[in-house]
Image (cartoon, rainbow, N blue to C red):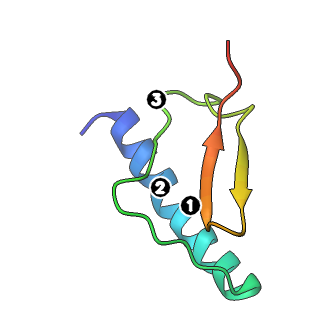
Amino acid sequence: MSTQQTTTETNYRQFIAELTALTRKYGVAIQSVGGVILADAQGEFSDVSYCADISSGDLYPEFPEE
């Protein structure tokens, strides 16, 4: 197993733990099937933001154009 794969898997598990805590704190759960985007490099998502339309329930990341 490569170091990158190990780091990605570790980061994913930590993200899920924090997402679980946020869900419990705010009462908002996310249902997503196949909708996860994983960074290939550290800092790749440093400028990401989210567009959330509460009326539709859509939540998606916005990446600035390079």
Tell me the kind of residue under disc 3: Asp
In front here: 13 or 20?
20
Quarter that holds the C terminus: top right
What residue sits right under mark 2 in the picture?
12
Q: Earlier in the sequence, mark 1 or mark 3?
A: 1
Distance between mark 3 and mark 2 Cα atoms: 12 Å
| Left or right side of 16 for 43 | right
How many tags in the picture? 3
**Quarter location, residue 23:** bottom right
**Quarter location, residue 24:** bottom right
Position above or below: 54 against 47: below
| Left or right side of 16 for 44 | right
Tell me the kind of residue under disc 2: Tyr
Position above or below: 41 against 13: above
What residue sits right under mark 3 in the picture?
40
Q: Residue furthest left?
A: 1
Q: x, y percentage for residue 35?
A: 42, 53
